[in-house]
Image (cartoon, grey):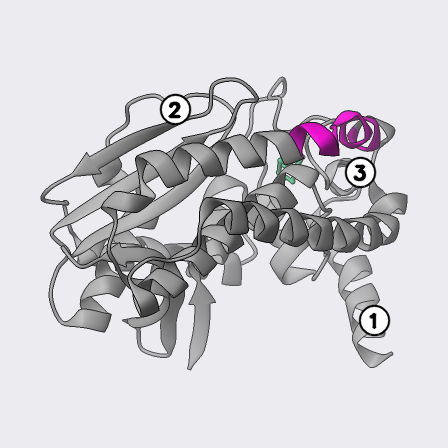
């Protein structure tokens, strides 16, 4: 049975060309400090709720801060190695943007984020499932896999996000990720969730805050989700990879896209020649 992860599907939704580089040609994602920071915060909160599930209390804020600092330092070590490997493929602009990001500032905002999370959210969540894996059938021979961050004992799914800008009110009932979590939740527990909450920790050195978007009765349409996942996998199997961003889009810029150089090469050589060249490179890499 072929398996597809949620993050893989979402990569195609956001940028089919990125999907080609990452999943078809096996190129590594270049690291970003901000991702390592988000990862360390997630790890900390996950550890807290794991403990809370066992002892009803979880860890104290001071311990959470220590855990986060260590997780972030470890993640930055990986960052250094990954950046060295990716350096030849990255633009000067990308590297310069990364260099300017201050680790000290990130450490501080992480601490402020934990303070507000532990004060404003954690006491009101009694964990049930923590990082629980799920899977469900998409069609014959294809299965979707993923993990739900957190659910509480009132059957509410919590999706934790960290961000630096206050998110706008949005209709989370049409959020693809949450729709998949809903199906996953039902597969695990045998019943639908009673609510879905997107919990944002808005990080700032002086004014970190929590913003939540929550629906009581989430909209669920398993058929639409399954149909879309199936169509995306068909498109990828048929080599449909395109740049869908407008020319002036900041996403497709030298500063932001770690695949920018490959993007330019692909435009110049065309899909077939590009795939032939990098498929061969991938094969050689696998043989080593
Ligand atoms: S340059 Fe644009 S289209 Fe190409 S991978 Fe990057 S974001 Fe996607």
In the displayed structure image, the side of residue 228 where residue 66 appears, left or right: right
Circle 3 Cα neighbour tier, 10 Å, few/some/many (<14 / 14–19 / ≥20):
some
Whether 101 is among the magenta residues is yes
Expressed as whole percent of the image width and height from the top left, the position of residue 179 reads 26, 50
Residue displayed at 42% across by 82% down: 1
Find the distance from the CA under tag 3 to the CA under tag 2: 31 Å
Quarter of the image where one finds residue 150: bottom left
Between tags 2 and 1, which lies in front? 2
Looking at the magenta stretch, what is its main secondary structure? helix
Name the N-terminal-most of marks 2 and 1.
2
Expressed as whole percent of the image width and height from the top left, the position of residue 8 reads 50, 57
Residue displayed at 16% across by 38% down: 215
Find the distance from the CA under tag 1 to the CA under tag 3: 20 Å
Q: Which residue is mark 3?
A: 261
Name the N-terminal-most of marks 1 and 3.
3
Ligand 1 appears in which quadrant?
A: top right
Circle 1 Cα neighbour tier, 10 Å, few/some/many (<14 / 14–19 / ≥20):
few
Q: Which residue is mark 1?
A: 285
Quarter of the image where one finds residue 50: bottom left
Q: Nearer the viewer, residue 193 or 67?
A: 67
Quarter of the image where one finds residue 219: top left
* Residue 177 in sight from this viewpoint: yes
In what quadrant of the picture does the C terminus appear?
Answer: bottom right
Whether 225 is among the magenta residues is no
Disc number for residue 167: 2
Circle 2 Cα neighbour tier, 10 Å, few/some/many (<14 / 14–19 / ≥20):
few
Q: Nearer the viewer, residue 229 or 171?
A: 171
Q: Which residues make up the magenta segment?
A: 94-106
SS at badge 2: loop
Residue displayed at 41% across by 32% down: 116
């Amino acid at each position: 049975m072929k398996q597809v992860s949620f993050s893989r599907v979402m990569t195609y939704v956001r940028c089919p060309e990125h999907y080609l580089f990452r999943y078809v040609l096996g190129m590594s994602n270049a690291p970003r400090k901000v991702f390592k920071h988000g990862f360390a915060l997630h790890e900390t909160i996950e550890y807290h709720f794991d403990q809370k599930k066992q002892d009803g209390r979880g860890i104290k804020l001071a311990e959470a801060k220590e855990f986060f600092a260590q997780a972030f330092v470890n993640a930055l070590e990986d960052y250094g190695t990954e950046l060295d490997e990716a350096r030849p493929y990255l633009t000067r602009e990308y590297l310069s943007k990364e260099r300017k990001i201050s680790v000290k500032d990130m450490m501080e905002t992480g601490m402020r984020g934990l303070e507000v999370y532990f004060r404003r959210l954690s006491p009101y969540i009694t964990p049930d499932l923590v990082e629980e894996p799920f899977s469900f059938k998409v069609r014959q021979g294809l299965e979707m896999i993923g993990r739900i961050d957190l659910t509480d004992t009132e059957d509410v799914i919590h999706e934790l996000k960290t961000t630096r800008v206050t998110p706008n009110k949005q209709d989370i009932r049409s959020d693809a990720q949450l729709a998949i979590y809903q199906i996953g939740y039902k597969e695990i527990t045998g019943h639908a969730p009673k609510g879905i909450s997107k919990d944002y920790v808005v990080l700032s050195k002086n004014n970190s805050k929590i913003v939540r978007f929550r629906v009581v009765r989430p909209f669920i349409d398993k058929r639409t989700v399954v149909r879309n996942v199936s169509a995306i996998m068909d498109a990828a199997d048929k080599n449909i990879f395109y740049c869908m961003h407008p020319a002036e889009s900041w996403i497709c810029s030298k500063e932001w896209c770690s695949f920018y150089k490959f993007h330019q090469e692909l435009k110049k050589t065309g899909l077939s020649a590009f795939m032939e060249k990098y498929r061969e490179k991938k094969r050689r890499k696998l043989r080593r």
